[in-house]
Amino acid sequence: MFAGVGPAIVLFAAGLAIGLTYGMSTGDLRYETPRLLTATMATLPAVWVMAGIAVALFGLLPRFAAFVSWAAFAVFLILELGWEMRQVSQYVFDLSPFAHVHWSAEVTVRSLLSLTVVAMLLTVAGLIGFRHRDVG
């Protein structure tokens, strides 16, 4: 199974559940469900970037891949929390891939495609690095 399909299924299920739940509570299923499902699915390229970082690290720095991948995710979370509490500027928050698909940002096709290309490049770099390792 393609690695990007798993997160897509999870995000789709979460977005559908959020949309249906909120739609039923407001009585507007036909508007809220697609709106919230779309908003949830818009975060998929940022999740792919995070996965691309993990693959790149696994291929290029296998000893540190798990630690640095989780550390990067923690940094992205801290950046978002700091930005939401007005302790971090927008320029610093923009270092996180999740800043470009945040609910408060204007999510454009360009930002989605840019994140997808970055995720692909990171994944390819990791696969090339893995290919050059002496795995056996």
Image (cartoon, rainbow, N blue to C red):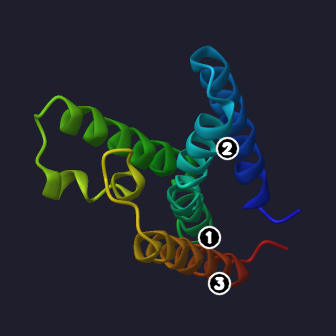
Q: Nearer the viewer, mark 1 or mark 2?
A: 2
Which quadrant is the C terminus positioned in? bottom right
Q: How far is disc 1 from disc 2 in space, using C-alphas? A: 26 Å
Q: How far is disc 1 from disc 3 in space, using C-alphas? A: 7 Å
Q: Would you call the spot at circle 2 few (<14 residues within 10 Å), some (14-19), or many (20 or more)?
A: many
The correct choice, above or below, for 16 with respect to 60 in the image is: above
Query: The residue tagged with tag 3: helix, strand or loop?
Result: helix
| Occupied quadrant, residue 74 | top left
Residue at 57% in and 47% down? 66
Q: Which residue is mark 3?
A: 128
Sooner in the amino-acid sequence: mark 2 or mark 3: 2
Sooner in the amino-acid sequence: mark 1 or mark 2: 2
Q: How far is disc 2 from disc 3 in space, using C-alphas? A: 28 Å
Q: Which residue is mark 1?
A: 59
Q: Which residue is mark 2?
A: 11
Which percent across, then down, holds residue 115? Answer: 47, 70
Q: Are marks 1 and 3 in contact (CB under 8 Å)?
A: yes
Q: Is residue 108 visible in the rendered structure shown here?
A: yes
The amino acid type of the residue labelled 1 equals: Gly
| Occupied quadrant, residue 23 | top right
The amino acid type of the residue labelled 2 equals: Leu
Residue at 64% in and 45% down? 34
The amino acid type of the residue labelled 3 equals: Ile
- In the image: residue 37, left or right of residue 135: left
